[in-house]
Amino acid sequence: MKISIRPARWGEMPAIISLISHYPKELIQKPLPKLRDFFVAVHGEIIVGCCALEIYSRKIAEIRSLAVASHYGGRRIGSRLVSACVRRARSRRVREVLVITESDRLFSRLGFRPFHKQKFALFRVF
């Protein structure tokens, strides 16, 4: 069965929170983004990944709350979710996208670069 990426729908926040809750509490930013900011990866009827794009202004947005169910790792779901966020940022004409992460390898592959030599703050400029 194919895994599809789409905007989150009404009633899916509990599944999103469940995915995010598997990560250490110190890595989870509070408050969580709004449902309208999320994309989800769906396998059949099951949400197996999520990622949010929080747009602060036309100048900058932030990718937040990227999570993929552990038994779905290695299928490029994270890359597809981040790419969906980047497409949304471009369609809204946001100039820069920020991500704060400990997994810089994934984001580097997707065109993000360190911000002023900060290891965990990466930007992608359009």
Image (spheres, rainbow, N blue to C red):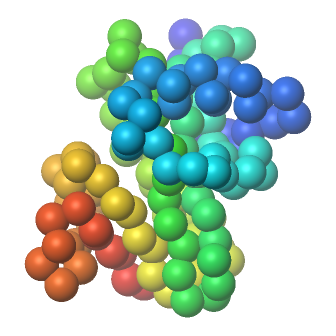
Whole-percent x, y for residue 71 in the image: 37, 10
Whole-percent x, y for residue 37 in the image: 69, 54
- Residue at the image point whose x is 45% and y is 51% from the top: 82
- Residue at the image point whose x is 50% and y is 50% from the top: 29
Quadrant assignment, res 89 = bottom right
Query: Is residue 124 among what the camera can see?
Result: yes
In the rendered image, the quadrant that contains the C terminus is: bottom left
Whole-percent x, y for residue 91 in the image: 64, 74
Residue farthest along the right direction in this orientation: 10
Q: Would you place residue 106 above or below residue 76 in this image? A: below
Q: Nearer the viewer, residue 17 or 87?
A: 17
- Residue at the image point whose x is 23% and y is 47% from the top: 103
Q: Would you place residue 116 above or below residue 2 in this image? A: below
Q: Nearer the viewer, residue 111 or 58?
A: 58
69 with respect to 87 (left or right): left
Q: Would you place residue 70 above or below residue 63 in this image? A: above
Quadrant assignment, res 24 = top left
Whole-percent x, y for residue 73 in the image: 32, 21
Q: Nearer the viewer, residue 105 or 14?
A: 14
Quadrant assignment, res 18 = top right
In the rendered image, the quadrant that contains the N terminus is: top right
- Residue at the image point whose x is 50% and y is 86% from the top: 95
